[in-house]
Amino acid sequence: TNNKIGVLVMSYGTPQSLDDVEAYYTHIRRGHAPTPEQLKELTDRYEAIVGGVFPLRENTNGQVAGLQDKLEQLAPGRYVCYQGLKHAVPYIEDGVEQMARDGIKEAVGIVLAPHYSIMSVGSYNKRAQEKAAELGIKMSFVKEYHLHPKLLQALSERVTDGLERLAKSSGNAAPVKILFSAHSLPEKIREMGDPYEQQLLATSDEVAKLANVDAQDWQFTWQSAGRTREPWLGPDILDTLKVLADEGIKAVLVAPVGFVSDHLEVLYDLDLEAKQAAAELGITLERITMLNKDPLYMDTLAESVINAGSLE
Ligand code: FEC
């Protein structure tokens, strides 16, 4: 046996190559292969993003390594990190199996997404817990860390920086609106009493306060809704931009606080799609930089892991 505590760091996952996109998309769609048109549309989006085709893989690797370093500083020799992805290899189950092979008996799970939803973090944790139970590993989980003071600080610094960048790129255009955003989910989460929406609003509200943004200068909007027939939470950012244009807003700073890295939903949906839509409406749009390996984010993760372990 191994008396270190395993840390299963879970993230969304991204394909390993363009040949892998179909298998990845099929996994997201719970085994239903996409049509050739859907596959082409997704492949085109990956090919269009700046910064390499699949930046999420490198960013997740960097975050796992950064968390390991931080844990080593705070509690030398106590924790060992493993990666588990939702829709790509190494899958969540692969990470748990690796812990078992290494003789780990006790582990903590944490997702690289700050807000809890039954459909997001809840489903990651469920998969990890099932595999851990099967292999005799005792696991506890960090459910959410959306109000961790260091996360809020990192995000509010980014809002302040982003507003300066926006003032420059828009030639001080006014009025300005800050749009906090996150990945939409099917509307049915409301009937489930899911905390996702309320947690996202709480993060947005705290970050706005720390960055000295007045209540009337920010709002929350959804982005990246799935391409399914059921209703998704709205309004979508593309619709919100139209309303803001009608209200005379000239500059927008998007703060995608539901995400922690540069990836498709940020680099395509915001930097290409939303930016272009805004330009057509006469609005200059900038986005806050993502957390990636920010030391304050690494502290947030490490402190959350250590607290989860000590709650028992
Ligand atoms: O860069 C990358 O390769 C991956 C970017 C990526 C992230 C991400 C995060 C979240 N998703 C969440 C929920 C859903 C639901 C569906 C869904 C579908 C997709 C598709 C792609 C995709 N998601 Fe994603 N998501 C990312 C990428 N997501 C590609 C498939 C094409 C499309 O619909 O656009 C719908 C599944 C279904 O059909 O039933 C639901 C949530 C997050 C944020 C929390 C987290 O990171 O886990 C929630 C990054």
Image (tube, helix red, strand yellow):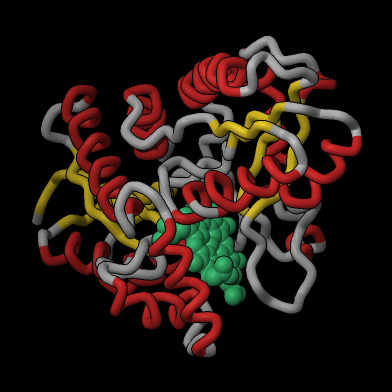
Q: Is residue 200 left or right of residue 268?
A: right
What residue appears at the point 46 percent right and 61 percent down from the top-left corner? Answer: 124
- Quadrant in which the C terminus is drawn: top left
Side of 278 relative to 288 (left or right) = right
Residue name at image x 43 percent, y 36 percent: 311
Return the x and y of residue 205 as percentages of the image width and height. 71, 25
The residue lying toward the viewer, choosing from 112 and 282, is 282
Nearer to us in this view, 78 or 242: 242
Q: Please state, as top left, top right, bottom left or bottom right, where the N terminus lies in the image.
A: bottom left
Using the rendered image of the protein, determine whether residue 305 is visible from the camera's viewpoint: yes
Give the side of residue 18 with respect to residue 124, left or right: left
Image coordinates of residue 168 in percent, x first then y, are: 57, 16
Residue at the top extreme, as displayed:
212
In this view, the residue in front, 110 or 66, is 66
Going by the image, does 114 lie left or right of 48?
A: right
Residue displayed at 79% across by 69% down: 231
Determine which quarter of the picture holds residue 300.
top left
> At 76% from the left edge and 75% from the top edge, which residue is drawn?
230
* Closest to the observer, 104 or 281: 281
Q: Residue 217, percent across and down? A: 79, 21
- x, y percentage for residue 303? 37, 28
In the displayed structure, 278 sits above or below 206; it is below
Residue 152 in view (yes/no): no
Numbered disc total:
0
**97 vs 288: above or below:** below
